[in-house]
Structure formats: C-alpha cells, structure tokens
Amino acid sequence: MPMKPIESKVCRMILTSRMVLGEDHQTQACKGELENYMNQCPLWLQPRDNSTNNWMDLDQKMTETIVLVRALGAKYFLIPDDAAMQERAEGVEKVLFSIMNTMVYLINKICFAPNNPEKQFDPVYAKSRFARKFVSFAKKLDPLLEGPFIMGDTLPIHADYLLYACLYDLRNFLPEPFESNDYPKITNFMDKFYNYRSPIRRWFASEDSKKGEYIRPPVPHIMEMLDAIMAVNKDIVSVISNLSGSGTFFSF
C-alpha cells in the first residue's frame, strides 16, 4: 500500500507553497485524484515484473515520492510545458533516485547488521563511504542545474521541490559538502529555494518544516521497513486466503 499523500512532508511543503494551508485543507486536497497518484508512475520507475521491483528502493519511498511530486506538479501547474525541460526534470529525478537509495542501502544494509551485536551502526564509517558517492552525485547533478533552479532564474518547478527535499535529507546525513565551497550550484540552489520570495516562506516558517526528514532519516530504520513489508505481505496472504475460502481459484 503506497503512502498516503498527506503523510509526505514533501507533499505538505508543496501544498503550503500553493496556499493550501492548514491540516484540514491539506487533507481535503489530498483526496480524489491524488489518492491514486501511483497511476501516474513513469515507465522508468515501473517494475518489469515481480522480480525487478526496484530492489535498491528498499521501502519504495523514493518511487512513491517522485510519482507523488509529479501528480502534485500536474495538479498545481508546476510541470514545465517545454519538452526539453521535462526531460531535464526527469534527469534530476533519476539522479536523486540513485543517490537517495544509495544512502538508504549503505546505512541499512552495508553499515548496519541488526542481527549482529558486534556490528552496530558507525556513522563516521558510513559517512566516509558515502562521501565518495556524493562526489559522483554532484558531478551528475551540476549540469542539470541551470542556476539557481533547474530551469534557471525562473519559477521553481515540481522537481525543484523534490531536489530541495532530497538535498535536505542528504545534508542531515553528510553536512560537510554543504559547508564547503566545492559545490557552488548546490549551495546556491539550497539558499535561493529557502529564501525564495513566494508562499514557500510560509512553509519554512512553520513548525512542520523543522520536524524530521522529508523522505528518509540519516540513521538505520530497516526494522521499520521490514515491518511495513511484512504488513503488506500479511494483507496479500489474507486476501488470497479469503478468495480461496470463497471458492475463487487462480490460474497461472
């Protein structure tokens, strides 16, 4: 079961920037077409079969967030009309999908072993390994940032919101690159987006913006992911059991 739109901090940020204010109004805005946002999943994110379900996206959070941001972009006219800009925005999505899933995989699978008391999470070691990945990520992102935003010195588009959310989470995990002068485009983007003179300032002034991560925490949360997976599998087993009990049979 995909996350509900209102559960997404990225979603609440975008809604606030569109002057959809307050929990009640935002909850109402998330009903209807946004409830079925996964119907808008692009081809490159769709699994080819049951064995290719984005194995790096352990909790499906990036897949769901990218699709949800696209759905919000379509609803609130944040998707550019120009085909070249749409292609660039998708390029940003793909780079972010890769780096965010690299972070979660490294934290939860490489640098942490919940069943091994001797291998506890070492944030220093995890950051040192991830720092090399960040250099590669920045090189791929740089040509996609026209500056300060993805389309240049113009209005932020849907992918700019996604980019800010991901960079915020990455900075929580590895702040050093953001404190240096090695990545001026990224630093400039973060500053311009945060200080952009639009209703987005209402979001950054809110308490909601200051609480927790946008997409993923900078610490192991594999047990939470496993609980979610187990819950989904339990629902599937329950549905199959009910269908079998009612005399409904499957053919493959």
Image (spheres, rainbow, N blue to C red):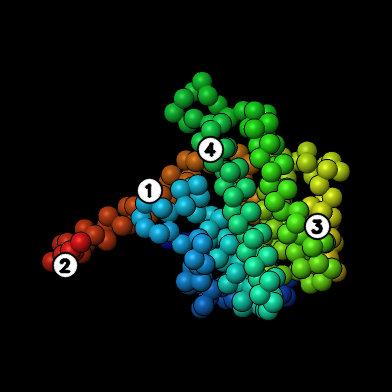
* Front label number (4 vs 1): 4
Amino acid found under the numbered disc labelled 4 = Asn
> Mark 3 — residue?
189
Going from N to C along the chain, the mark reached first, 4 or 2, is 4
Picture quadrant where residue 65 is located? bottom right
Question: In whole angstroms, how far apart are the C-alphas of marks 4 and 3?
Answer: 29 Å
Question: In whole angstroms, how far apart are the C-alphas of marks 4 and 1?
Answer: 17 Å
Binning the other alpha carbons within 10 Å of mark 1 as few (below 14), some (14 to 19) or many (20 upward) gives: few
Closer to the camera in the image, 26 or 103 = 103
Identify which residue is drawn at 72% across, 63% down. 160
> Mark 4 — residue?
108
SS assignment at label 4: helix
Going from N to C along the chain, the mark reached first, 2 or 1, is 1
Going from N to C along the chain, the mark reached first, 1 or 3, is 3
Would you say 82 lies left or right of 180 here?
A: left
Kindly indicate whether the residue at mark 3 contacts the one at mark 2 (C-beta within 8 angstroms): no
Q: Is residue 15 visible?
A: no
SS assignment at label 3: helix
Going from N to C along the chain, the mark reached first, 4 or 1, is 4
Identify which residue is drawn at 68% across, 36% down. 132
Of the numbered discs in the image, which one, if any, rests on residue 230?
1
Amino acid found under the numbered disc labelled 3 = Phe
Image coords of residue 230 (percent x, y): 37, 48
SS assignment at label 1: helix
Question: In whole angstroms, how far apart are the C-alphas of marks 1 and 3?
Answer: 39 Å
* Front label number (1 vs 3): 3
Of the numbered discs in the image, which one, if any, rests on residue 248?
2
Going from N to C along the chain, the mark reached first, 2 or 3, is 3
